[in-house]
Structure formats: C-alpha cells, structure tokens
Amino acid sequence: MTVVPDSPGRASQRADVPLRGFTVALTAARRREELGSLLERRGARVVHAPAIRLAPLEDDGELLAATRACVDLPPDVVVATTGIGFRAWMEAADGWDLGEPLRERLGSAILLARGPKARGAIRAAGLMDHWSPESESLAETLDYLLSTELKGTRIAIQLHGEPLPDITGALQGAGADVVSVPVYRWTLPEDASPLERLVESIVARTVDCVVFTSAPAVAGLLSLAAEANVEEHVLDAFRGDVMAACVGPVTAERLERAGIATTQPSRARLGALVREIAAELPARYPTLRVAGHVIHVRGHAVVVDGEERDLPPGPMAILRVLAARPGVVVPRADLLGALPGGGSDEHAVEMAVARLRSVLGSGVIQTVVKRGYRLACEAGPNDDQVHERVRERDLRQ
C-alpha cells in the first residue's frame, strides 16, 4: 500500500470539506438544525432520524410527586445531572406554586452538579453548588458520594430522561434514602419511520456515523432495534464500520458498556463534537495511489484525484474490501459475501467491478484469472505528477 501525502492545495481543500463523501445520521430532537448545518458545511450528507421526543411536563404526575416529596421531607444531598433538566424542574415547581418552598429546601442541601451546564442552572435558580466531578460523569459523582457515610442520608437525583438503576441501587445499598426526580421523560417519536430506516442503514453499513447528543437517544435507537430483533446487528456495526459519536460520557455510557468505542470531544459541546467527527471519520480511511490516481475511499463515495464520485452500495462494498487489502488478490467468493444482501451468483461481483471500472478507470482494478480481483497499487506515478493532476482539475473548476 502506498499512502500519498497531501499537497498544500489538496490539503486545504480537504480541510474545508473533510466530510464530503460521508453520510452522518443525527438522532437529536433538539438543536438538530444547528448540528446538521455544522456537519453539512464540512461536506457531510446529513440524515435526520430523531430517536426521542419530550413528554409535556405539565402532565407529569411523577415529577409533581417527587417535588412534593422534596418539599415535605427535604433532601440532604441533591444531584443535578443536566442543566436543561434542573431548569425545567424549577419551572415546573413554579407552575405548581411549589417553586419557593422547593428552592428553600434545596438551599439547605448539598448540591452536586454533574457538569458546567448543571452548575449554571443551579446558580441561575439562586442556589450554590458544592462540588462537580472533573470528568463530568455520574460514575465519578457516585464514587464521591460512596466515599462518605450515607446511612440515613436523603438524596434527590434529577434524572436525565431515563432511570438510573445502577446509581440509585448503589446509593440505596449504602443505606441512603433516594428520591428519583424524573424531570422530563423521553419516548419514541410519534413517527418512528425515519428511525426505523436509520436502524436498517446501520445494519447495512450504508451510514458512516451516528451522532448522539443524549443518553435517551441511545436508549431509543437500541430499543427500536430490539423490537426489530436486530439490536446485536446494530451493536456489531458500531463495533466495526459505523462510528458512534457522542457529545459526552453520560451519552456514551450505555454504548461503552456494550464494548463500543465511541468518539467524544474533550468538552461536551456541539461544535467540539463536529470538529472531532471531521478529524476522526476521514482518518479511518487510507489514501491510496492506484494506477496513477490518488484514491480516497469514503462512505458513499470515492474521491479520485480530488474529485468526488458517488457509487451505489454494491460497487462501494466491493471497493471497500479491495481497499482494505490493497494489492492483494481477493477471491470472488469473498467479494460476493461483501455485497449487500449477499447472494450466490458471482455474476453480481462482475457487474459491480464493471461499474467500478467505469467510475474509477479501467486500470484501477485488475482481474487475476481464476482467482479474483485486486487494486493495482504498485503502478502509480510519482507524487508530483499526482499533485499536478489535482491542481489542473482545481483550475478547470
């Protein structure tokens, strides 16, 4: 395999649109237009498939009951897990004429903020937080609480969309009295068809990256996948070809428990998440010099000498296998198994290879009689010739 260094012109072009040729799916219910715009500006093809929707607070009897429980028997410790959740709790309490007594009770408690947004919401309510985990994770918060004597301690935990049985169970096991505060509840969207299509795309590996901005979105997608009996196939895809990008450790927790390595920014911010995706996703695919061309395989396209060319799923699958083993003869049977839907007719492989040659050029893929196909990686021009070809194309445009 020959990895080709970027020329200055080509490097700047790729820096402007590093995600061209990739399909990125968004599961967000909030700020999806902003996030989608950030990704599209970097060249990504964006697919929207909301995995959750927000249940109305005014109809939430569980939240009202938890609020009254905190007013009637004040907690000793309060854990705020999200900024939006803590603010919504205060607003809901105000609507029930419980805001003032609730703030009074919380003002006498030890307030723990999972991260800066939760801290900001606490202070916006006129309260003062006492501690935050450096990692912004609930796991570190739990360790902090368990390092103290908890027997007889009343702890209120503001949930972030789904129960936290591991956290509450550990605290109760240490002797604490735990009040779960379900500030907002997430359910599957009323129209789940985009999410169903996304699950199918993940299984088929026709999407390159799925972006999660909340833990409930992860739960929603996996729940729908479980209903369709394909949850393990989805998890396998995330362990391999499909990148799972999460805004922070809380969002990523369930995936990482399943053995999935997630992409996360150092700070839980949308802009930082997009920058991380733009850096890591293209780096998963090598740049090859094949038969005089610079080829960069992407998700739904291939970039040839700096020019993006779309490919159907079948030829794309064949190219990915050949690019993963550049210069090595790949048997037709292996290529047949890589085609979407599989099959038993090797003629489908011949048709896919013919399509590839029409897009990439006849010399890129070589036929090895009675054995299979290979990328012609050993026969390329020198780097100056390749870079000159890219510069000429840019001037024509």
Image: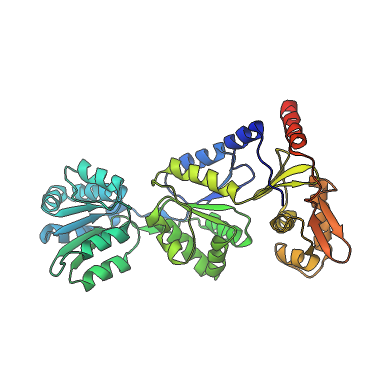
Res 228 seen here: no
In the picture, which quadrant includes the C terminus? Answer: top right
Residue furthest right as drawn = 369
Q: How many marks?
A: 0
- For the residue pair 112 and 381, the one nearer the viewer reads as 381
Residue 169 percent coordinates (x, y): 27, 70
Q: Quadrant of residue 159?
A: bottom left
Camera-side residue of 155 and 201: 155
Residue 106 screen position, x and y as percent: 14, 52
x and y percentages locating residue 277 in the rendered image: 52, 46
Question: In the figure, is residue 134 to the left or right of 393?
Answer: left
Q: Please identify the residue farthest to the bottom as the structure is shown.
A: 173
Question: Horizontal and vertical percent for residue 337?
Answer: 73, 67
Describe residue 236's horizontal placement relative to residue 268 as left or right.
right
Q: Residue at x 53, y 41 (%)?
A: 39
- Seen at 80% across and 52% down, the residue is 376
Above or below, 89 against 41 in this view is: below
- Quick one: 215 or 369, which is closer to the camera? 369
Which color scheme does this rendered protein use?
rainbow
Question: For this view, does 210 lie left or right of residue 287?
Answer: left
Name the residue at 84% across, 55% down. Answer: 366
Query: Dividing the picture into quarters, in which one does residue 272 lie?
Result: top left
Q: Residue at x 29, y 53 (%)?
A: 57
Answer yes or no: is residue 185 visible: yes
